[in-house]
Image: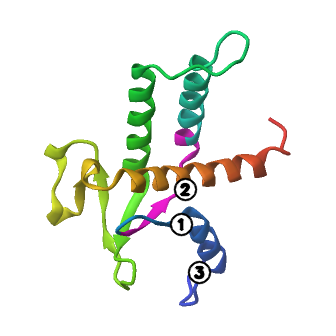
């Protein structure tokens, strides 16, 4: 097993699929893909919330306050897990950035930023991009036997 100075095209191709950029209101975020276990936990959580928000006849119900809080917490946890870096919209420089769930964990010198400090529409855009990547992967895996 030798090494070479040439770039590994397979690794480069895989790495491109593990990251994507998300346009936020003020910044552009670079996020990572979900791990298989994160994707499973996300699917279970979304399924539980969806079934709790439906009547026995399948008709949608208004979400309760507790369900809204649970959904919001799950979205924040997901955004905290996937954000890796950010840059200004026309900027060239990416800065390491990790979102943290509580303000006491915030440490801007280490790139740790409280999720409450970014616009809520950015959190939604991040979560949408992360779950879109997951849904695309799940759809691609669907033809394979379980």
> Which mark is nearer the camera, 3 or 2?
2
Marking on residue 60: none
Label 1 CA crowd tier, 10 Å (few <14, some 14–19, many 20+):
some
Q: Which residues are magenta?
A: 27-38
Residues under numbered marks 1 and 3 in contact, where contact means CB atoms less than 8 Å apart: no
Of the 4 image quadrants, the one containing the N terminus is bottom right
- Number of labels in the image equals 3
The residue nearer to you, when weighing 146 against 129, is 129
Residue at x 17%, y 62% (from the top left corner): 108
Q: Which residue is mark 2?
A: 129
Which structural element holds mark 1? strand
Between the residue at mark 2 and the residue at mark 1, the CA separation in whole angstroms equals: 8 Å
Dot 2, how many residues are within 10 Å of its Cα: few (below 14), some (14-19), or many (20+)? many
Label 2's element? Answer: helix
Residue 20 shows which numbered tag?
1
3 is higher (above) or lower (below) than 47: below
- Under circle 3, the secondary element is loop
Q: Are marks 2 and 1 in contact (CB under 8 Å)?
A: yes
Q: Which residue is mark 3?
A: 2
Q: Mark 1 or mark 3: name the one nearer the start of the chain.
A: 3
> Residue 122 at what x, y percent from top left?
40, 56
Q: Mark 2 or mark 1, which is nearer to you? A: 2
Quick one: which residue is furthest to the top in this view? 56
């Amino acid at each position: 097993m030798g090494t070479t100075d040439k770039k590994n095209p397979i690794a480069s191709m895989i790495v491109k699929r593990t990251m994507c950029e998300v346009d936020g209101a003020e910044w552009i975020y670079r996020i990572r893909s979900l791990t298989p276990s994160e994707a499973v936990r996300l699917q279970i959580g979304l399924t539980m919330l969806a079934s709790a928000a439906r009547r026995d006849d399948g008709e949608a119900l208004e979400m309760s306050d507790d369900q809204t809080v649970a959904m919001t917490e799950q979205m924040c946890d997901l955004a905290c897990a996937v954000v890796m870096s950010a840059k200004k919209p026309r900027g060239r420089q990416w800065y390491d950035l990790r979102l943290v769930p509580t303000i006491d964990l915030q440490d801007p010198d280490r790139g740790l930023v409280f999720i409450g400090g970014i616009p809520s529409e950015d959190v939604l855009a991040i979560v949408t991009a992360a779950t879109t990547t997951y849904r695309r992967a799940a759809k691609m895996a669907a033809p394979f036997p379980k």
